Amino acid sequence: MKKTPKSMQIKFLAFVLATPLVGNAQYTTLSGIPGLDSGNSIADYVNVLYKMSIAIGITLSILIIAYAGLEYMTVDVVAEKKKSKTRITHAIIGLLMLLGTYVVLYQLNPDIVSLKFGGN
């Protein structure tokens, strides 16, 4: 097994220890972020980023399924049909992984999904 350098371990430890301190920081932004109603804490931004990334992942998966389905219907070559099937399968697996991570985190603790740090 490959060893990680000491400097990498120290950086990771510093990041883990500094996260609670940065989580409650307040600052003013130049422009608003869609989906962020009030508050300017890091936790609010991470929460919005988490929700937006799930929405983007779902949208991309649906677009890939639609494209692969169209490709499957229009192509006559068996090998290309097989590629389309695997694209659809991989997109569905990706959707199930997104759903699975959300369900597991929600079952462990619903506050994990909302990402509320400190006294927020």
Image (cartoon, rainbow, N blue to C red):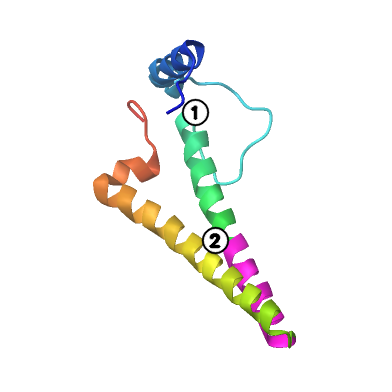
Residue 55 lies, with reference to residue 20, above or below; the image says below
Residue 86 colored in magenta in the image: no
Residue 46 lies, with reference to residue 97, above or below; the image says above
Query: What amino acid is found at the position of numbered circle 2 in the picture?
Result: Ile
Q: Distance between the residues labelled 2 and 1?
A: 24 Å
Q: Decide if residue 82 is on the left or right side of residue 8.
A: right
Foreground mark, 2 or 1? 2
Residue 110 lies, with reference to residue 59, above or below; the image says above
Q: Residue 54 in the image: x percent, y percent?
A: 51, 53
- The residue located at (44%, 16%) in the rendering is 9
Find residue 84 and report its image quarter.
bottom right
Find residue 56 and report its image quarter.
bottom right
Q: Which mark is residue 117?
A: none
Dot 2 or dot 1: first in sequence order is: 1
Find residue 34 and report its image quarter.
top right
- The residue located at (31%, 52%) in the rendering is 104
- The residue located at (49%, 28%) in the rendering is 42
Q: Is mark 2 on a helix, strand or loop?
A: helix
Q: Decide if residue 36 is on the left or right side of residue 3.
A: right
Q: What element carries label 1?
A: helix
Total marks in image: 2
- State whether the magenta stretch is mostly helix, strand or loop: helix
What residue range appears in magenta? 60-74
Q: Mark 1 points at which residue?
A: 42
Query: What amino acid is found at the position of numbered circle 1 in the picture?
Result: Ile
Which quadrant does the N terminus fall into?
top left
Q: Residue 79 in the image: x percent, y percent?
A: 68, 79
Q: Mark 2 points at which residue?
A: 58
Which quadrant does the C terminus fall into?
top left
Residue at the limit of the structure toward the left, as seen here: 108
